[in-house]
Image (cartoon, rainbow, N blue to C red):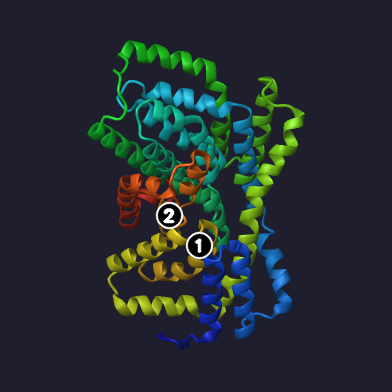
Amino acid sequence: MLFNQQLSVVELGWDFYLPVLLFVGLAALAVPVWAAIGSAAILMLLMSGALPLSLVGESLFDGIDAFALTAIPLFVLTGDVLVRTGLSRKFLDVAEALTCWTKGGFGSATVLVCGMFSAISGSDAAGAAAVGRMTIDRLVESGYPRPYACALVAAGACTGILIPPSIAYIIIGLVLGISASTLFLAALIPGIAILVSILVTNLIVNRIYAYEGGDPMTFGEWSTNLVRTLSQGWYAFLVPGIIFYGIFSGRLTPTEAGATAVIITIILGFILRTLKLSDFPSMLLSSAKVVGVILPIIAFSLPLAQALAIMGVPQGFVAAVTGVSEEPAIIILMMIAILIAAGCVMETTPNIVILAPILKPLADNIGMNEIQFCIMMITALGVGFITPPLGLNLFVVSGITGESILKIAARAVPFVFFMLIVVLFIAYVPAISTTMLPDIYK
């Protein structure tokens, strides 16, 4: 396979294709992703000689020896503490109080609480599990079919990597050398746009099928209930408030904000007497399991990305795509299609580490802002959380409810459609991603 370039011609042989086939085969056999990527990376290095194997160990540790990555376990632990202290239920109470004035109120509250949880944990799976356990049974009692209730939670939890602070933006910032704080700021409007699209989708579906019955509250009842609920649970919003203020004011780095959030959440748990010292081992173990999945993937993906770069794959990919069409609008559609297809079959972390260095030169070639590219990439990959065969959120809600993954996926189709509309807006309207940024990034 030949890629024509301005400076040279890159010919990809079995030193590229055989590792790719190995990865696909291992993934199909349900081998852990980090092991599949690591095996493919080592085989590629052996066959191509792109990087001496003696340097692989150093590359693995250097790749994850980054201060920015410390934020990942801190945000994961904050989300775990939030659930164990019962503060997450305060979010649900407030979300329900905000939306009870309209039909479909509890469905909207479910989406809102997903967004609130996302503003703390930065993890889709954690949000889907925590919110799903609190809301799915109540959604069914309110009149929603169980598969649709599961799809609603799965879609709402997609905001976990889209609303800052987000683990995905920390990773892509590390890979491309962009400040995570800058990406958080840029992702605020797109993340809210995705949240609104899910809210609107639920309201439309609920209006068509009348899932949620009952009469909405009057304005007087609503305002009284909202004030009462806020007075009883305002302290829960100290945690996201500190995170947002610290990061967006520039007073705290994401890592410092994560550490502060952990401390504040633990203190609130002790004050409310919902957290005990005996809870810490299980909390730390639970968070370690999540982080233990993410970091090995990053570690083994980086040598693979380095090998691909040395072999000239990113440049060859640019030449191949521009050979099909040089129209920026068409190239953007092709990138989105690649990202959505990748999100359907592989987790976000390896997709970011492997695809970001390959697609970034293509985005540069058409003049796309690097911040806009990052936001578009993460948002497009986020759609993959509710699309089979690997939609992670589908598996999470299926696991906690026993509902069929295919039934949940079928009910998630409207959410996928509206989320894709937002992805297109992000891709073609730079201002959505750059409005909140200083002029230097625009």
Q: Is residue 119 left or right of residue 2?
A: right
Neighbours of disc 1 within 10 Å: few (<14), some (14-19), many (20+): many
Element carrying mark 1? helix
Residue 424: give x, y in percent of width and height: 31, 55
Label placed on residue 351: 1
- Give the amino acid type for the residue marked by disc 2 in the picture: Gly
Asked if one can make out residue 435 in the rendered structure from this viewpoint, the answer is no
Q: Does residue 226 sit above or below 167 in this rendering?
A: above
**Quadrant containing the C terminus in the rendered view:** bottom left
Q: Quadrant of residue 101?
A: top left
Q: Residue at x 36, y 39 (%)?
A: 148
Q: Is residue 211 above or below residue 191?
A: above
Q: Quadrant of residue 78?
A: top right
User: Label for residue 21?
Assistant: none
Callout 2 environment at 10 Å: few (<14), some (14 to 19), or many (20+)?
A: many
Q: Position of residue 420 (x, y in %)?
A: 33, 52
Pointer 2 or 1: first along the chain: 1
Residue drawn at the location 59% of the way across and 68% of the way down: 37
Left or right, 174 with reference to 405? right
Label 2 belongs to which residue?
A: 384
Q: Nearer the viewer, residue 62 or 77?
A: 77
Mark 1: which amino acid? Asn
Residue 99 position, x and y percent, is: 37, 25
Horizontally, residue 51 falls left or right of residue 357, namely right
Element type at marker 2?
helix
- Residue 238 as seen in the image, left or right of residue 149: right
2 or 1: mark nearer the eye:
2
Point out the image quarter for the N terminus. bottom left
